[in-house]
Amino acid sequence: MKKIKGFGGRSYGKPDKPEGIEKIQQQMREQLEKIEEGFENIEVVGTAGGGAIKVTAKCSYEISAIEYDKSLLEDQEMFNDLLIAAINEAMREVTKKRNEEFSKVVGLEGLPNL
């Protein structure tokens, strides 16, 4: 955007961004895209019931495996509760891992869970 000069020498409009900032923004965007693509290959695990149920999830928010002790099938309500707990734990781990990876790029530690 060009600056427009009014009467009295005042400038109106916003000046163009310096090229250096645009280059840095583009590099950061590219790094973030690479990280996002890499999340497909990073897996985390959530467990419940002392390890009776284990849920493996990709950092792209996809469940890739569920393992459980077959004896849990005798009590379906408990099985459902533990499965939900393990999935929730896996999703918390995904969020934690994603924040860690993103913080490496932007240089911020301890990002809040988004």
Image: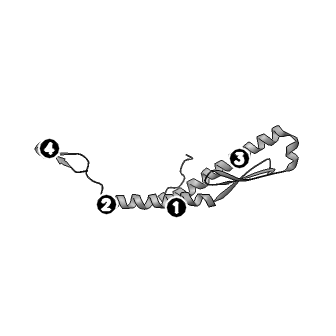
Mark 4, secondary structure of its residue: loop
Give whichever of discs 2 and 1 has the lower sequence position: 2
Mark 1, secondary structure of its residue: helix
Q: What's under tag 3, amino acid-wise? A: Ile
- Where residue 97 appears, x then y in whole percent? 61, 55
Give whichever of discs 2 and 4 has the lower sequence position: 4
Q: Gap between marks 3 and 2, in whole Å?
A: 45 Å
Numbered label attached to residue 19 = 2
Neighbour tally class for label 1: few under 14, some 14-19, many 20 plus, Cα within 10 Å:
few
Q: Gap between marks 3 and 1, in whole Å?
A: 26 Å
Neighbour tally class for label 4: few under 14, some 14-19, many 20 plus, Cα within 10 Å:
few
Tell me whether the residue at label 4 lies in contact with that at label 1, contact meaning CB atoms closer than 8 angstroms.
no
Dot 4 corresponds to which residue? 6
Q: Name the foreground residue: 42 vs 100.
A: 42
Q: What's under tag 4, amino acid-wise? A: Gly
Dot 1 corresponds to which residue? 34
Q: Gap between marks 3 and 4, in whole Å?
A: 61 Å
Numbered label attached to residue 87 = 3
Q: What's under tag 1, amino acid-wise? A: Lys
Mark 2, secondary structure of its residue: helix
Horizontally, is 58 left or right of 106 in the view? Answer: right
Horizontally, is 55 left or right of 12 in the view? Answer: right
